[in-house]
């Protein structure tokens, strides 16, 4: 059996499971905010931002949750 060694082949990004429905929000700038319906969605968004070295803050507003990117 003959094996070929390939050079300069980029490794694809590792993905764990399906992509987040909030993936598009990674383009938020500092001071931007988004309103979500549930506390779970707000926590999911905060975790996603923190995994990309961003900080977020959340406040409850009239039964919904607003998440701001603060850093």
Image (cartoon, grey):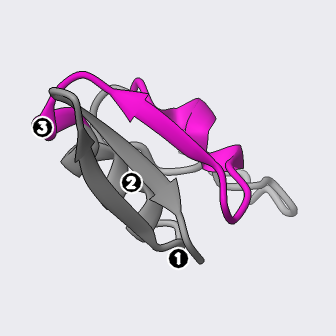
Which residue appears at 80% of the width and 53% of the height?
A: 9
First in sequence, mark 2 or 1: give its number: 2
Q: Residue at x 12, y 37 (%)?
A: 40
Q: Nearer the viewer, mark 2 or mark 3?
A: 3
Q: Is residue 69 above or below residue 20?
A: below
Q: Which residue is mark 2?
A: 48
Image marks 2 and 1: residues in contact by CB distance under 8 Å = no
Mark 3, secondary structure of its residue: helix
Give the crowd class for mark 1: few <14, some 14-19, many >=20 residues within 10 Å: few
Q: Can the viewer see residue 2?
A: no
Residue 54 image offset from top left, x and y in percent: 53, 72
Q: Which residue is mark 1?
A: 53
Quadrant in the picture for residue 8: bottom right
Q: Does residue 26 sit above or below 22 in this rendering?
A: below
Q: Is residue 26 magenta?
A: yes
Q: Dot 2, crowdedness within 10 Å: few (<14), some or many (≥20)?
A: some
Residue 26, image x, y percentages: 61, 47
Give x and y (percent) for residue 1: 53, 44
Instruction: Identify the residue at horizontal 20%, vertical 50% (top origin).
Output: 43
Q: Which residue is mark 3?
A: 40
Q: Is residue 11 left or right of residue 21?
A: right
Q: Which residues are magenta?
A: 20-41
Which residue is nearer to you in this view: 57 or 55?
A: 57
Closer to the camera in the image, 5 or 68: 68
Q: Considering the numbered disc 1 on the image, is that residue within a helix, a strand or a loop?
A: loop
Q: Is residue 9 above or below residue 20?
A: below
User: On the rendered image, what quadrant is the C terminus found in?
Assistant: bottom right
The question of residue 32 being in magenta is answered with yes
Closer-to-camera residue (41/14)? 41
Distance CA(mark 2)–CA(mark 3):
12 Å
Q: Residue at x 21, y 29 (%)?
A: 62
Instruction: Give the image location of residue 23, x and y in percent.
Output: 52, 35
């Amino acid at each position: 059996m003959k094996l070929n060694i390939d050079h300069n082949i980029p490794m694809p990004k590792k993905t764990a499971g399906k992509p987040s429905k909030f993936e598009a929000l990674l383009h938020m700038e500092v001071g931007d905010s988004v309103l979500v319906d549930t506390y779970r969605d707000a926590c999911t968004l905060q975790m996603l931002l923190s995994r990309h070295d961003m900080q977020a803050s959340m406040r409850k507003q009239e039964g919904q949750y607003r998440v701001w990117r603060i850093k």
